[in-house]
Image: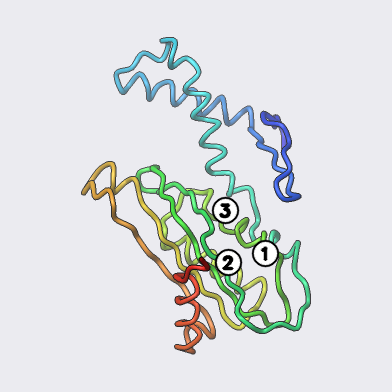
Amino acid sequence: MANEKHYLPEESIDGYVKIDRYNDDKIRALSSHYKDILANLGENPEREGLIKTPERVAKALQYLTHGYDLKPDEILRSAMFQEDYSQMVVVKDVEVFSMCEHHMLPFFGKAHIAYIPNGHIVGLSKIPRVVDAFARRLQVQERLTNEIRDCIQKTLNPTGVAVVIECKHLCMSMRGVQKQNSVTTTSAFTGEFINNDKTRAEFLRLITASLD
């Protein structure tokens, strides 16, 4: 990518090399707007504590929305394996951090995902990465839930997919109704999780059960 720089060093996390990238042209464009925003809020963008704020916010926004540059289906395909396994695979308590597209305020919580293999399994670390690829965009929780479900269904072609997401929304707790303890839960299912009540009940039991 042109004008792209690495601002943070590489660090290995479970074998995955993470490099934060920033596009200089986007940083300059976003920074100029945020300088105006600070002034319009009644602040002095030239005072010591705010001089670098526009650039910091621009970099933060690029990171928080870097999911637009990712291809979740390719993430899954990079670690698909043929396997004769047809029982439920559950990955629960996947951390979710996203930005509400209505107010550009964060919402965050956990995702619980299951699929029933149909000849193929996927490396378990890829499912949280798919969650992140969709979450790191301007989102609504309902669409995020469906996008994760549809990506897994179309790419792996399992006999069923289940996704449940539980999040707190700062647009509810910091403004508007200001209900600090409210949690929003969304769900999306395909295949066996729709057609088989026992399968769906088992999934819900597993994501609420404790291993302690």
Where residue 167 sits, quadrant-wise, is: bottom left
Amino acid at dot 3: Asp
In the rendered structure, which disc, 2 or 1, sits on the residue that comes first in sequence? 2
Decide: few, some or many residues near mark 1? Use Cα within 10 Å; few <14, some 14-19, many ≥20: few
Q: Which mark is residue 124?
A: 1
Residue at horizontal 64 percent and vertical 51 percent from the top: 70
Which residue occupies the extreme right position in the image? Answer: 82
11 or 118, which is in the foreground? Answer: 11
Q: Is residue 102 above or below residue 127?
A: above
Q: Nearer the viewer, mark 1 or mark 3?
A: 1
44 left or right of 126 in image: left
Q: Are marks 2 and 1 in contact (CB under 8 Å)?
A: yes
Residue at horizontal 61 percent and vertical 74 percent from the top: 89
Where is mark 3, residue-wise?
Answer: 132
Residue at horizontal 37 percent and vertical 64 percent from the top: 185
Residue 143: x and y, percent?
Answer: 45, 62
Q: What secondary structure is found at the residue carrying circle 1?
A: loop
In the rendered structure, which disc, 2 or 3, sits on the residue that comes first in sequence? 2
Amino acid at dot 1: Leu
Residue at horizontal 35 percent and vertical 44 percent from the top: 103
Q: Are marks 1 and 3 in contact (CB under 8 Å)?
A: no
181 or 28, which is in the foreground? Answer: 181
Where is mark 2, residue-wise?
Answer: 91
Q: Is residue 175 above or below residue 23?
A: below
39 left or right of 7 in image: left
Q: What secondary structure is found at the residue carrying circle 2?
A: strand
Q: What secondary structure is found at the residue carrying circle 3?
A: helix
Where residue 7 sits, quadrant-wise, is: top right
